[in-house]
Structure formats: structure tokens, C-alpha cells
Image (tube, rainbow, N blue to C red):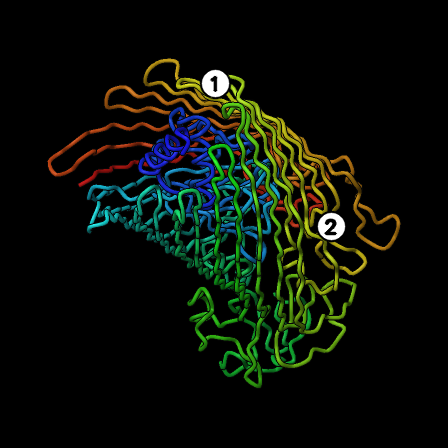
């Protein structure tokens, strides 16, 4: 056997012992580990956990545990916000309410999020909910693929790249780690992790971690509450092989933040929020504006998963990897409370038509016909099974062939059961599962605003070849993936738009009035199946100019199949899948004290789908707004000028352009003139810096991020101005204190200079950016958190 191959295998085994397992799928990471060893003999060299050395033939940026642990409590996405091309906006400083992220101009529904290779995006609308992220303490690394996916990525939505989270490996020594954090807005968080150390005759290790967070909103009335449990069992099998099972469970109960129009913000009303009490005179508790009652604006979630990873050498040169997982999600969002008029049978949440089952009926059994509020949730319950597998053949030290298969099935149940409020005013069960409170009609019918059963099925095959030549200076990665995505759709309601339906046993009188001058025919309950498939090439090449310098280029095609809400529209419309092709050309420099990269990129985006108003039918529908061009530059640099001082900088320039106008009606004059305009919500310029200095027991760091101006819509009129936010961290290591080991105290200050800024943008119509259609998140003011941590 070739001696260099033996050396590579020995080094690989050592690396597996030193590093946590798998950010991407086990198959992808296994191939990359071997290629890194053969080409470099070293992995994960970085500057303070940033500017991580990359050897893949695509544009990737990463952060490691060294950087993550210094950021204090908060969303893991806040940590990667320093990376080029990433723009993250958090609704609060705690990271427990939610957030919005774009990657090279793609929104989060067009980015694939993966945890140990398991897909995290919603199976229906591809939404990603940062509030459901695992605690940042369990991560060892986060990889961000800019513009491209891995060839085996189990996703039908990744038009703009992937974000891969990696779970830490359990410690080999027994230990209990405890930390508590308190601070602004009565923030209080407790975190405990227990590592078993090596147990049993096979060196099995495990950890379990639990956290609890409580805080007040930084504006208005309301709370943020989250409870979470994480764990992992890891079993080495020898020669770098292993088996692992990890688990996660999370509950959140939050009151929503109120988003404010630009005109209100420019007039100084930065603290606008929902009303603290129900005003019986105004009877406006259900309003979506600031007079709406805060207790009716909730966003509860219960979710969990169990994920396995397995790697085994079948022969000396043949490796099998299998990553099975199961996920469960129960979530509610949207408008939570509406009004019923028992005399007319009108429920205001479902437009102005009357429900025959409710007309003249005393639904709440109070002995009279009256008008009152009812709970109006939008509940989604998802059960999802995924299996990602690879068979890897190491032909010789220079050539690798890999076959991958992915199976992914999501059972997506969407309901909207109206329920009576407890005591007439309070939401009891936030998921409307208590049948005794369900609103029912004259004949016992359940009254719902939606009732759907969907199945999202993905069968994907992929093959990839990796080769290295000329003493491993030249690398090729050539691959193709062939996803076949199918949606089984069952709508049990009469659909009046993509978001409004009439769900009851009685056939409605048609046409149904929608509240506009236009009357429409509701779409009857129906079942149907749609499927999409495409051959997607994925290629990369790199050449090592010297020991420290590498150039590379990559090309990848992606597909994003239509979302569930788009397909459940009243109209029988044909929606093409969104497709994109991305080309990158980059340069990397890597040495022990300096590491950096720069990439030029271009993405051609076809069949972009948005929800927009159609004048001819008087309703909002899924609309193909055509093609867009996106291109730019991403760069990052980390260096260590003196011992103890780490400096990291990144910069991004993104240019976007709509390539066609878009019709919104039958008339030739009904055209949205957006050709040549920029895409909304995307900053053209971003740059960031992190400075970290360690001396003795002290550790100081300062982080700054500038985010440029963003337009609210394709009209390019209203915009959110650019802003800069600075954060600062100070840590003092106390050391050992009695039974307590590695004790430290830390202070994190977020928004150090109390910048007032508009962060994310919420737009109801991509072709309009008026005060009635565009609203803005308000960035959290200065927030100070104190943490005490120790280990036993």
C-alpha cells in the first residue's frame, strides 16, 4: 500500500480524535477530512476562531468554538453575522424571539440550514426560525457555504447557499459545567452541562445540557421565555469510525415585537408597541396596530429532534456513512385573535362573508347573540424523517468516488381552529388543542380558517468525484445531484386566497365577497400532487500556488421548489421552481499568523416567486416576478500582529438587479416597472471587524458591523438607512476556587453606543413600500449581560 496513503489515514484518525464530528453530512465531512489531510496535513487553522483556513473548492467561511464561547448568550446567527455576505437582524438582544438573515442577498427561505447534516427549514414554506436554534454552547463549529450547496445537501430550497451547524463532542473526562447570566430587561438564564467522560469498556462518552431563559421585551409589555435540553452519545469504533446519537428539545413562549412604519420612526416613535391592556370602550384588542393587546400577539413553539450519525469502513478503501433523523415541530403564529358577530355569522379574520353555521347562533352559550373575541391561531404540526447516506470509494490517494442517496419526508399538518378565550379574554392553550374550547357551529361543526394535510417527499441521488494531481497542488471536485421533489396536497377547505379559507361542512354560497369590489369563486376542497426534478451540476477546482496561496473556482446550480402556501392558492396557477446558477472565483492566503480570502461571484436567478397583488382578481397571489442578477465581492482577513492580539475584518459588496417588468393585471398598462431596480431588503455594503486581546487572566474583545442601506421593496423608494453596531466583551479568569475549576466572570455589552436603527424589513407587497405595507424592526438598545461560569 502507498506510504502516503498510510500517512494520510493515520493523520485522519488523529484528526477525528481531536475534532468534533460533522458539520455537514457525515459523508461530505468524511471526504473533506481526507482531502484536507492529503493536501495540507492540517485542518481548522484559524485566528481566534475566525478566518478559518479552508481547503474546499468553493467559497466558505467558518467560526469555531473559540470565538462562539466569548460571545455570551444569544443567537448563534449573531456570531456568524461578522462573516462576509451574512446579514443577520435579531428582534431582541437575547436571541430567543426570532431573527431575519440573508446570505449574499438570498432570504432565509432560500438558504438551507443544517444541524449535523439534518435539514432545519420548514417542509412547507422553507421558513427557518432562529428562536428554535440549539443553545450556542453545544456548537463546536459553524460552516457557511456562500452561494453553493454540498452535493448531497438534503434540501429543495437552497438557492443561496447553506449554513451548517456542528454539535460538540462529549468530553473524555467527567465534568459538570454551570453558568448563570443576568442583565438588562430582567434577563436571567441558567445553563448546566454534564459530561460523563469515558464510560464502559468501549470508551463511550456522552453529555446532556439544559437551559432556562426568562426576560422582558426591551419595548412594550411582554416576556421572552425559553426552556431547552440537548444531549449527545458518542461511540468511537476505531480507525476514525464512529456512531453517534444526539437529541434536542425546545419550548418557547414569547410575546411578539411590534414593527413600526418608517414615518413613525422618523417622527421619533421608536418605542411603539402593542397595548398593555384591553380597552373595552375602543374594543380594539384584535387590532394589528399599536392599539392591539400584547397578550394576543404570541409566537409559541414546541420542537425537538433526534439525529444519528454513523461511519464505518466496510473495507480498507470503502466507507459507508448513514445519517438518520426525526424531527417534531408544533408552532403557532400570525394573527391570533379575531372577532365573531353571532347575529351576522361574520368572522373578521376570514373576510366579510357570513358563516351559515354561525348566523343567529349562540356559539359561546351565554344566552344571547353577541359580538366577542375568539382565538384564531395558525397552527402547524410537522413530523419529518430524513436519511442521508453515502458510499465512499477511495480508489487511491489521489482519487475518490462517492455515491449519495437522500430520503426526506415531511408530514405537514396545518390547522386554524377558532377557540373561545378563557374568561372571554385570555388565550389558554396556545395551540388550540383543547377541544372543549373549540368554536363550533349549529350542528357541531368545527369552525376553522384553514385545514390542510401536506406531505413533502424528497428522493435525491448524487455522485461526486474528487481528484488531486501534481503533488496535490491541483484539486478537482466534480459532482451532480438529481433531486426529485414531490408535494402531496390535501385542502379540506373552500379557498378564497393563499391565506384565507372557509372550513366547515356546509357548502358556502358563491361567489364569496372578499372585502374588495371584486367577487370571486372559492376553490372547492381538493387533493392533488405536484413534482419537480432537475439535474444539478456542482464543480470546483483549486490550485496551490505556494505553501500559503491558493486560487479556486466553482460553479453550482440549485433549485427551490414552490412553497406550500403558493400552491394552496385559490387559483389553479402553474408556478415554476426557482432556479439559480452561481459562479465563484477566489483567492486564499493561509499561514499561522495571517489567513484570508477574497471571492468574486455572480448568481443568475430565474423564476423568483413573491406574493403580490393581482388587480384583475382583487387578491394577493403567488407571482413569478421573473429573473434577477446578483453579483458581488466577499472578503475576510484575520491576522495576529503580536502574541495575544487577534484582528479579524470582513467586507461585502452585493449588487442586484431585476431583469424584467412584472404585470399585475390583464391590461397592458397594469405593469410594475421594476426592470433595472434592486431587490428589496439587501444591503449593498457591509463590513465588520473583531479585535480580541488576551493578557494574563484578562480577555478583551470589541466587535463592530456596518450594514448599508436597504430598500423596502422592488420600487426602490422607501428604505432603511445604514447603521453601525458595536459590541464589547470582557472576561476575567478566576481559575480554580475550592471545588470550582476554570471559574470566570464575563460582561457582554451589546449595542455599546446605543445606536437607534431599523434592522429587518417586513413588506406585505413587494411592489409597494408605503406606510401601510412596509414595517421595520427596531434594533435592541444597549444591553448589558453578566455571566459567571465554573466547572466541577
| Relative height, residue 756 to residue 569 (above, below) | above
In front: label 2 or label 1: 1
The quadrant the N terminus occupies is top left
Expressed as whole percent of the image width and height from the top left, the position of residue 7 reads 37, 30
Residue at screen point 45% across, 71% down = 433
Q: Residue 732 is drawn in which quadrant?
A: top left
Disc 1, SS: loop
Q: Residues within 10 Å of mark 2 (few under 14, many from 20)?
A: many
Q: In this view, does 451 lie to the left or right of 395?
A: right
| Relative height, residue 360 to residue 414 (above, below) | below
Check disc 2 and report the residue beneath it: 624
Looking at the image, the residue that sits furthest to the bottom is 443
The quadrant the C terminus occupies is top left
Q: As rendered, which of 126 and 144 lies closer to the eye?
A: 144
Disc 2, SS: strand
Q: As rendered, which of 633 and 378 lies closer to the eye?
A: 633
Expressed as whole percent of the image width and height from the top left, the position of residue 725 reads 48, 29
Q: Residues within 10 Å of mark 1 (few under 14, many from 20)?
A: few
| Relative height, residue 470 to residue 525 (above, below) | above
Looking at the image, the residue that sits furthest to the front is 1
Residue at screen point 66% across, 63% down = 568
Looking at the image, the residue that sits furthest to the top is 642
Residue 548: mark: 1
Q: Is residue 44 left or right of residue 196?
A: right
Expressed as whole percent of the image width and height from the top left, the position of residue 280 reads 50, 64
Q: As rendered, which of 641 and 674 lies closer to the eye?
A: 641
Mark 2 → mark 1, Cα distance in angstroms: 46 Å
Q: Earlier in the sequence, mark 2 or mark 1?
A: 1
Q: Is residue 226 left or right of residue 523?
A: left
Q: In this view, does 667 lie to the left or right of 326?
A: right
Residue 349: mark: none
Residue at screen point 22% across, 48% down = 196
Amino acid at each position: 500500500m502507498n506510504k502516503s496513503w498510510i500517512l494520510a489515514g493515520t493523520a485522519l484518525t488523529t484528526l477525528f480524535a481531536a475534532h468534533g464530528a460533522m458539520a455537514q453530512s457525515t459523508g461530505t465531512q468524511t471526504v473533506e477530512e481526507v482531502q484536507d489531510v492529503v493536501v495540507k496535513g492540517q485542518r481548522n487553522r484559524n485566528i481566534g476562531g475566525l478566518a478559518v483556513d479552508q481547503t474546499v473548492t468553493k467559497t466558505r467561511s467558518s467560526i469555531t468554538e473559540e470565538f462562539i464561547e466569548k460571545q455570551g448568550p444569544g443567537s448563534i446567527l449573531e456570531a456568524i453575522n461578522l462573516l462576509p455576505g451574512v446579514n443577520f437582524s435579531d428582534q431582541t438582544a437575547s436571541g430567543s424571539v426570532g431573527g431575519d438573515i440573508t446570505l449574499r442577498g438570498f432570504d432565509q427561505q432560500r438558504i438551507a440550514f443544517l444541524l449535523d447534516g439534518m435539514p432545519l427549514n420548514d417542509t412547507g414554506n422553507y421558513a427557518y426560525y432562529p428562536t428554535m436554534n440549539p443553545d450556542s454552547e453545544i456548537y463546536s463549529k459553524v460552516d457557511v457555504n456562500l452561494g453553493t450547496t454540498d452535493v448531497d445537501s438534503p434540501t429543495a430550497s437552497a438557492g443561496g447557499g447553506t449554513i451548517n451547524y456542528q454539535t460538540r463532542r462529549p468530553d473524555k473526562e467527567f465534568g459538570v459545567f454551570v453558568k448563570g447570566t443576568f442583565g438588562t430587561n430582567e434577563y436571567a438564564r441558567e445553563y448546566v452541562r454534564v459530561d460523563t467522560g469515558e464510560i464502559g469498556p468501549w470508551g463511550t462518552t456522552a453529555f446532556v445540557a439544559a437551559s432556562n431563559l426568562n426576560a422582558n421585551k426591551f419595548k412594550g409589555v411582554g416576556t421572552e421565555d425559553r426552556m431547552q435540553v440537548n444531549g449527545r452519545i458518542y461511540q468511537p469504533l476505531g480507525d476514525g469510525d464512529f456512531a453517534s446519537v444526539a437529541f434536542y428539545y425546545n419550548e418557547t413562549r414569547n410575546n411578539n415585537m411590534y414593527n413600526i412604519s418608517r414615518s413613525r420612526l422618523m417622527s421619533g416613535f421608536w418605542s411603539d408597541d402593542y397595548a398593555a391592556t384591553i380597552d373595552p370602550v375602543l374594543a380594539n384588542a384584535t387590532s394589528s396596530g399599536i392599539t392591539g393587546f400584547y397578550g394576543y400577539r404570541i409566537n409559541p413553539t414546541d420542537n425537538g429532534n433526534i439525529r444519528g450519525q454513523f461511519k464505518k469502513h466496510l473495507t480498507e478503501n470503502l466507507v459507508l456513512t448513514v445519517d438518520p433523523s426525526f424531527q417534531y415541530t408544533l408552532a403557532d403564529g400570525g394573527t391570533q385573535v379575531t372577532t365573531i358577530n353571532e347575529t351576522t355569522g361574520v368572522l373578521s379574520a376570514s373576510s366579510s362573508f357570513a358563516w351559515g353555521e354561525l348566523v343567529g347562533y349562540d356559539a359561546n352559550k351565554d344566552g344571547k347573540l353577541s359580538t366577542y373575541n375568539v382565538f384564531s391561531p395558525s397552527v402547524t404540526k410537522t413530523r419529518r424523517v430524513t436519511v442521508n447516506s453515502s458510499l465512499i470509494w477511495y480508489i487511491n490517494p489521489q482519487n475518490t468516488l462517492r455515491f449519495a442517496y437522500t430520503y426526506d419526508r415531511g408530514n405537514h399538518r396545518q390547522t386554524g381552529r377558532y377557540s373561545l378565550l378563557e374568561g372571554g379574554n385570555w388565550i389558554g392553550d396556545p395551540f388550540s388543542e383543547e377541544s372543549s374550547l373549540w368554536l363550533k357551529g349549529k350542528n357541531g361543526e368545527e369552525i376553522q380558517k384553514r385545514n390542510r394535510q401536506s406531505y413533502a417527499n424528497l428522493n435525491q441521488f448524487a455522485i461526486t468525484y474528487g481528484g488531486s494531481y501534481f503533488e496535490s497542488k491541483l484539486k478537482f471536485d466534480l459532482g451532480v445531484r438529481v433531486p426529485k421533489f414531490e408535494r402531496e396536497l390535501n385542502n379540506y377547505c373552500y379557498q378564497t386566497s393563499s391565506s384565507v379559507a372557509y372550513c366547515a361542512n356546509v357548502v358556502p354560497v358563491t361567489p364569496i365577497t372578499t372585502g374588495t369590489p371584486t367577487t370571486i369563486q372559492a376553490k372547492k376542497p381538493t387533493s392533488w400532487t405536484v413534482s419537480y426534478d432537475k439535474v444539478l451540476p456542482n464543480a470546483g477546482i483549486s490550485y496551490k500556488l505556494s505553501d500559503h496561496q491558493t486560487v479556486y473556482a466553482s460553479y453550482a446550480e440549485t433549485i427551490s421548489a414552490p412553497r406550500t402556501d403558493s400552491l394552496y392558492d385559490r387559483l389553479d396557477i402553474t408556478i415554476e421552481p426557482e432556479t439559480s446558477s452561481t459562479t465563484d472565483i477566489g483567492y486564499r492566503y493561509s499561514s499561522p499568523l495571517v489567513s484570508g480570502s477574497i471571492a468574486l461571484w455572480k448568481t443568475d436567478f430565474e423564476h423568483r416567486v413573491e406574493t403580490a397583488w393581482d388587480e384583475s382578481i382583487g387578491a394577493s397571489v403567488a407571482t413569478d416576478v421573473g429573473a434577477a442578477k446578483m453579483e458581488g465581492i466577499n472578503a475576510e482577513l484575520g491576522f495576529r500582529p503580536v502574541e495575544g492580539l487577534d484582528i479579524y475584518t470582513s467586507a461585502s459588496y452585493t449588487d442586484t438587479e431585476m431583469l424584467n417588468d412584472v404585470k399585475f393585471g390583464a391590461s397592458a398598462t397594469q405593469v410594475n416597472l421594476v426592470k433595472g431596480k434592486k431587490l428589496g431588503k439587501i444591503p449593498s455594503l457591509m463590513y465588520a471587524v473583531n479585535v480580541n486581546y488576551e493578557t494574563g487572566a484578562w480577555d478583551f474583545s470589541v466587535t463592530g458591523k456596518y450594514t448599508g442601506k436597504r430598500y423596502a421593496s422592488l420600487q426602490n423608494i422607501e428604505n432603511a438607512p445604514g447603521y453601525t453596531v458595536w459590541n464589547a466583551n470582557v472576561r476575567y479568569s478566576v481559575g480554580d476556587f475550592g471545588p470550582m475549576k476554570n471559574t470566570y466572570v464575563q460582561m457582554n455589552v451589546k449595542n455599546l453606543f446605543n445606536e437607534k436603527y431599523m434592522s429587518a424589513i417586513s413588506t406585505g407587497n413587494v411592489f409597494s413600500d408605503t406606510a401601510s405595507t412596509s414595517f421595520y424592526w427596531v434594533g435592541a438598545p444597549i444591553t448589558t449581560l453578566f455571566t459567571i461560569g465554573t466547572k466541577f
